Image (cartoon, grey):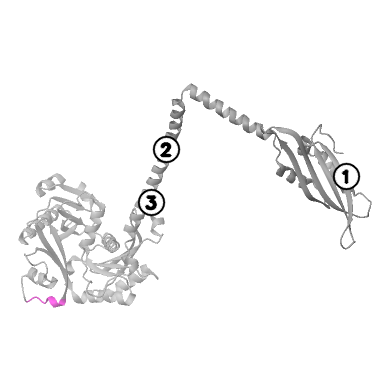
Amino acid sequence: MLSFLARMGSPKAIGIHLTGSEAHACLVTTTPFGSVVLANQSEALDLERPQDAVRRLISGLSNRRKLPVTIGLPVEQMFFTTRPMQVGGGEASPRVLLREALFTANAPIEDLTVDVVKLQLGRHKLASIVSCKKKLIERLASCREALDLPVLRVEPSPCALVRRALKIDRKYRRTNVVCRLFLSTTHVLAVLTAKGQPLLWRQTHLPRGDEASPILAAVRSLTTISEQSGLDLQPEVVVIHGRSDLSRLLDIDWMREQIGLPFQWLNSPAMDDGEVAIGLAEGCLDDDETSFDLAKGFGAHRSLWQSFPWREAAVNVAMIAAMLAFVAFRLILVSDANASASIRNDQRSMASQTMEELQAEKQDLTLRVAAIKKFLDGRIVWTNYEREIASVLPDGIFLTSLQGTSEFGSKGKSKGNKKLVLTCAMSTPQPGMIPYELDRLLNRLRTHPTLNRDFPVIEPAGLKQYKSADENETLAMFTLMFLPKGAKKAK
């Protein structure tokens, strides 16, 4: 299911993690059910020309479509700290904040790229500062122009691990300060976070056989450094990620006693190149504005396709569809309730009438029906006769006139004086001969059910022949009289 959704045009991004000798990349797409890794690739890394490995990775994963890219730098290649901001220092530039953090005015910060993320934690106003060599960022930023990338971001790799941890571990997302430790086979990375934002981090070696000591030392080191930095923020919980095999080998109760804080061990995300690359790509897909971007000043831009809030639009469309379905369901329920109420009202109105009223209403309706029936029984609908007679006329005979008579008395009763007179015309082959069509017409009329019902007696009244104007044809005019049963024949 996730693989199917991933190939339906969902937004995609590439995350690249640079280590000492290797660059690892992941192609990640986002779906409503989470992120999906579509491809992985690794390349050898030359520290003097890291852009070459990055270009090969991007070209191998993006194919023809240009995708946004986030590059993660390892801890040893950057400087990072978090300091409380002085009153009135909210508008200070990143370089000024970096110089204050270094406690020197002679540091060559012109050769460094700096980015600052500001955080409001209760009454504390904090500034997280990250910097690295400008030459490294310039080399990486050259990939954007060479490959025409819509977005290229550069951020510290610990930020990607924290982002992955927040997606997996949602229990402490709202906790103010959390100490997270990410383990690998050789190192432990300790990160002090506040509401998901990294404040401080330290990376130390993890010796085999004595893993508990560096873990405890990393927690204590972060606590000490935060006090020396003036943060006055103590972790509320300790969460270890990765190397779940150690949780069965180490004395967890002893470690919990030494730490003195709530303690939890999760299997992922470990301090792994793949996890870091996935976290980098997710940051680009989520468009996390609170994350660092050391390539911010090198012309990185975002296309309209990348800037459009697809996820928010999908959520809004889903909410509108759900609301429409709910309104339609409620409309059906209200319509059914209205119909039921109408039926009950009709039943109540009928039940509220007395028997005398119902008998009076019945008698009135009976009289009306009898009057209408009496009127219709003596009435002849001449239009029906016109239609029926026209349907039985043979070819060559034309109806020229139709005259019907049905007399009614003063009270609407028929007197019985009814008759129907038809006048027809036809052509004859020779003068003095009666065409056989006349006999055919008389046979059809005598057997017609409608005529037999009201006018069973048919009498020819006369036959006259005329010459046409050009004297090439002889026309015969004849009259047929229809009388009811028992009527006196016309003389």
Q: Is mark 1 on a helix, strand or loop?
A: helix
Residue 364 placement (x, y as % from top left): 55, 28
Q: Can residue 100 be seen in this view?
A: yes
Residue that badge 1 annotates: 439
On the picture, is 382 further left or further right than 456?
left
Callout 2 secondary element:
helix
Residue tagged by mark 3?
321
Q: Give the crowd class for mark 1: few <14, some 14-19, many >=20 residues within 10 Å.
A: few
The answer to the question of whether label 3 and label 1 lie on touching residues, with beta carbons closer than 8 A, is: no
**In the displayed structure, does residue 260 sit left or right of residue 481?**
left
Amino acid type of the residue that numbered disc 2 sits on in the rendered structure: Asn
Task: Give the x, y percent position of residue 92.
Answer: 11, 70
Closer-to-camera residue (259/427): 427
| Quadrant in which residue 315 is drawn | bottom left
Q: What residue type is labelled 1?
A: Asp
Residue drawn at x 52%, y 25% is 360
**Where residue 156 appears, x then y in whole percent?**
21, 65
Q: Residue 6 lies in what quarter of the image?
A: bottom left
Spatial distance from mark 3 to mark 1, Cα to Cα? 75 Å
Q: Is residue 108 magenta?
A: yes
Extent of the magenta region: 106-111
Q: How crowded is mark 3: few (under 14 residues within 10 Å), some or many (20 or more)?
A: few
Label 3 sits on a secondary structure element that is helix
Front in this rendered view, residue 43 or 432: 432
**Precedes in sequence: disc 1 or disc 2:** 2
Rendered position, 48 above or below 284: below
480 relative to 126, above or below = above
Total marks shown come to: 3
User: What amino acid is found at the position of numbered circle 3 in the picture?
Assistant: Ala
